[in-house]
Image (tube, rainbow, N blue to C red):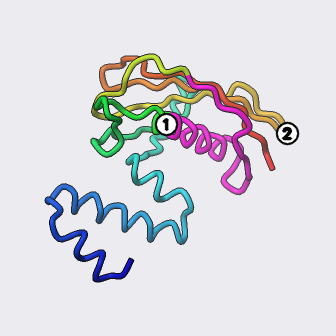
Amino acid sequence: MTLEGLYEELADLNESEVRTIHKLVQALKRTRVSPLAYIEEMMNFQSVGFDEEKGVYVHRMLITDELKNRYKILHGGITATFIDTAMGSTVFQAVGENSRAVTLELSVNFLSPGMDGWLKAETRVVKKGKTIIVLETKVTDEREKLIATASSTFFRL
């Protein structure tokens, strides 16, 4: 693919598609310094912070048309990616930004379709050991409808 070929591909995009492409190009450039930037940008991923009252780390993502499947609902793989990203962010917040950890296991229960708007992930640290961290997450939509639950084990490197 040449730049000329890319320009030709872009020529007939509508305004919304151009905005999406621009956002993805900017995210791709940010991956040079932040490896998760592309995935997080696609999901409009946000770390909201720690809710002391509930004892959970809160993250959000926005459902967009690009993330929906053929049935016009949020793709299950994107839901799982959101949960895994929220859990990974929780690990780093709970044990320190300089620590390294990877997902060993992730189990997701899809309970209701994600249709539109913002999803919220509330993640609780169940056990924080020297090498193993166990987490649980609940994902709800803007109407507080439960979309998914998940449990995961992370391994500290």
Crowding near the residue tagged with mark 1, few <14, some 14–19, many ≥20 C-alpha atoms within 10 Å: few
Residue type highlighted by circle 1 = Gly
Q: Secondary structure at mark 2?
A: loop
Query: Which kind of residue does numbered mark 2 sit on?
Result: Lys
Using the rendered view, name the quadrant where residue 9 is placed: bottom left
Is disc 1 placed on a helix, strand or loop?
Answer: helix
Q: Residue at x 39, y 51 (%)?
A: 42
- Residue 47: which disc? none
Q: Which residue is mark 2?
A: 130
Q: Which percent across, then down, holds residue 100?
A: 73, 52
Residue 15 picture quarter = bottom left
Q: Is residue 115 above or below residue 62?
A: above
| Residue 70 vertical placement versus 16 (above, below) | above
Q: Where is 13 relative to 133, above or below?
A: below
Residues in magenta, as a range: 80-108
Say whether residue 133 is left or right of residue 140: right
Is residue 84 within the magenta segment? Answer: yes
When asked about the image quadrant of residue 34, the answer is bottom right
| Residue drawn at x 32%, y 61% as measured from the top left | 23
Residue at label 1? 77
x, y (%) of residue 86?
54, 39
Q: Residue at x 75, y 27 (%)?
A: 127
Q: Cα distance, mark 1 to mark 2?
A: 30 Å
